[in-house]
Image (spheres, rainbow, N blue to C red):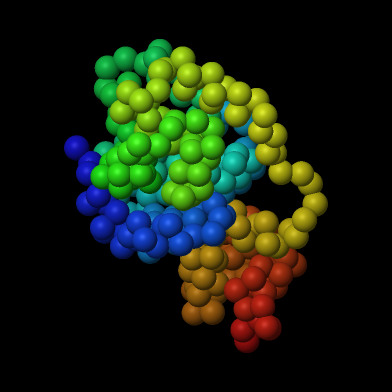
Amino acid sequence: MIWPQTVRQFLGIELAEQFQWRSSDEAFKAWRSALEECGIFVFKDAFKEDEVSGFCLHDDRFPLIYVNNSTATTRQIFTLFHELAHLLSGTGGIDTVDDQYIRDLSGRNRTVEILCNRFAGVFLVPDADFDERIKKIPINDTTVSTLANQYSVSREVILRRLLDKQLITRSYYERMVEEWQNNWSGRAGSGGDYYRTQGTYLGERYLELAFSRLYQNRISVDQLAEYLGVKVNNVPGMEALLFPRGAAS
């Protein structure tokens, strides 16, 4: 059994800090940094399959999580901790936007997916604090949205927590989730800052590690470009992400 509170303490992020984040983007960046400080690299990309939120690869030395940047940021946050639960349980896994597929699973596969969803929900919205906040308040769209903003999670996560506590019906949960998913069109458009986009996909910690190997003469510029997934002539632009006032010599 993986205890969310134990993992939260290990990551060193208290609820008070979580409530201070001003946006889901800020929340994702903080969670990503906390995981990478513990040795779990988090990468992002715009997946061709919209229904896949992310996946993880379990490895004793180099565990990693990949997140679909085309999904809502709050969904990306949930995916981080669904996949973290997989890694902590010694398994790999795939997170999808629609969790109805779990009903078709059986045995250990079904148990693991249910536990990973449960872990992510309780980690992001701890029981004791949540129970206190929902005391004597009506359960409606407004309060669900307010709670989602406070915890920097999706409305779906809040609804799932309410469903787990039997405060709403499954039919209401499924109806609202389907409505929100149908109304959200979040695929990133073309254009934008190429270097910043690539930096977001790779993560600051990975960039720092890759460039440190170059500065230590442990890899060539050609190898660095391969690790970054860019052409050699794009390496200076990626370097400028780390050193915006001028690349290191």
Using the image, determine if residue 175 lies above or below residue 145. above
Q: Nearer the viewer, residue 98 or 191?
A: 98
Residue at x 54% of width, y 32% of height: 141
Task: Work out whether 50 lies above or below 125.
Answer: above
Query: Closest to the observer: 144 or 206?
Result: 144
Q: Considering only vertical position in the picture, is 68 above or below 152?
A: above
Q: Quadrant of residue 207?
A: bottom right
Q: Position of residue 73 (x, y in %)?
A: 57, 46
Task: Compare residues 142 and 160 and report the one nearer the observer.
Answer: 142
**What residue is shown at x 50% (from left), y 31% (from top)?**
140
- Quarter of the image with the C terminus is bottom right
| Residue 131 x, y percent position in the rendering | 30, 40
Residue furthest bottom in the image: 249
| Image side of residue 193 versus residue 81, left or right | right
Q: Position of residue 212 (x, y in %)?
A: 50, 75
State the image quarter where residue 22 is shown.
bottom right
Residue at image coords 41%, 57%: 18
Furthest-front residue in this view: 136
